[in-house]
Image (cartoon, rainbow, N blue to C red):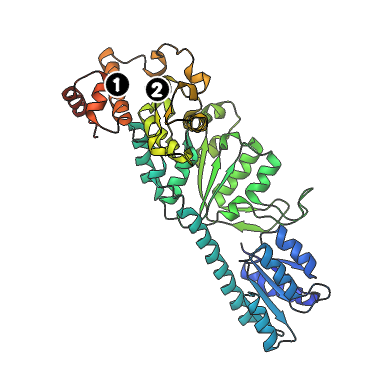
Amino acid sequence: METILIVDDEKNYLVVLEALLGPEGYEIITADNARNALRLARESDVDLIITDMKMPGMNGMELLEECQKIKPELPVIMMTAFGTIEMAVEAMKNNAYDYITKPFQNEQLKLTVKKALENYRLIKENRFLSEALSDRFKFGNIIGKSKPMLKVYDLIRKVAQSKASVLITGPSGTGKELIAKAIHYNSPRKDRQFVSINCGALTETLLESELFGHEKGAFTGAVAMKKGRFELADNGTLFLDEVGDMPLSLQIKLLRVLQEMEFERVGGTKTIKVDVRILSASNRNIKEDIAKDVFREDLFYRLNVMDIEVPPLNERVDDIPLLVKHFIEKYSDGKDKDNIELAPEAWKALYSYSWPGNVRELENVIERAIVLNSGEKITLDDLPEELTGEKAELDVDGFIPLNISLPKALEQIEEKLIRRALAQCNNVQSHAANMLGIKKNLIQHKMKKYDIVA
């Protein structure tokens, strides 16, 4: 719902304009002087200002100039009973959207308002697209070509074109928000807003306000109306990160909104309808939470129409070289990134580590190594102690199922080692064979066996 701020020292005009524009589906807030209007423009999510030109104290032209400083793209329509060509020219020079005289024609005013809001909507969408173009979350922004990640890409392609809610699960640090953005930017809603909120980072009261917005005076500190994430994501995508941490009492309200796609702001009575696609993520086992009565089963099935499980880094170790290369390029500012390499013992440390913090931890390790490294080769000295200490024995129980046969288990290990060696050697088969201590024709035979394309 778009919000219009009407400013006039004659209160009867405030009443008339609210009665005229309110039924058109706009939310109307009013101010009887420019000072109050300026405060509302700063504090509220306003989409258009209609202001009188002549007012005591700060006049309409001064209000326009101040609004240009804080929200230069916000459209302002000037109105006055003392219209002259000079006033109109001055207003337009100061980037007013339009200029109307009192008394105005109702239909003409409605049309002017509609065009101003449409123009502002396009400006916001273009700005959003310009910002997004520099960081498009296509599959290329998700690093990895291991089998588990190829399955994730396939699921993204399938779910992106639908309107279905998607629940993304996986341990912390695996890149669940990247997956959510990839779904959004490959969907029909890609030109609309992607809005996210961390449900575990806010108190229940603040989370409700952030999700649904609040009216002025709804609670202590609510000095102005504020739109919530559902409103901001209208016609786009809302990403509920760590949704498993949402308080049970708020889950009930969320379920109603997901069912009806309508809600009221905190402290408000007006029903607001939206069209929002819901993506959510959690590092918790929500089914266990359902059994413990800390998560609603009906909400789970509403969120989990489709599900994507993001693998932890220790299940996709053959992606480590690609990730390392990406993070070197990202953090080697001022250094020759093409010449930064890892010593063999450093690679061994990366592969031997269990990565409890997943990709996020690997990123921190590489950033730290680049900061500490003074040469062109990253060594053990550049890695944190937890990676360079004495390594534990191979955790067979941790990654091989108990019911698997020995030949099958050996095949899985062999395939992982070959994929990892090829990734580290940039798919140069002779180099990978040397790393594994086998001949080139044997690695080629194994690649055919495991359907590995290099």
| 382 is higher (above) or lower (below) than 454 | above
**Mark 1 vs mark 2: in front:** 2
Q: Secondary structure at mark 2?
A: helix
Foreground pick, 337 / 128: 337
| Quarter location, residue 309 | top left
Along the polypeptide, which appears first: circle 1 or circle 2? 2
Query: Which residue is under mark 2?
Result: 351
In the image: residue 227, left or right of residue 367: right
Can you name the residue that lies furthest to the front here? Answer: 375
Q: Residues within 10 Å of mark 2 (few under 14, many from 20)?
A: some
Q: Residue at x 72, y 74 (%)?
A: 51
Q: CA distance from mark 1 to mark 2?
A: 16 Å
Q: Residue at x 33, y 29 (%)?
A: 424
Q: Is residue 439 visible?
A: yes
Q: Quadrant of the N terminus?
A: bottom right
Amino acid type at circle 1 is: Gln
Q: Residues within 10 Å of mark 1 (few under 14, many from 20)?
A: few
Whether residues under marks 1 and 2 lie with C-beta atoms below 8 angstroms apart, the answer is no
| 269 is higher (above) or lower (below) than 111 | above
Residue 383 numbered mark, or none: none
Query: Which residue is under mark 1?
Result: 412
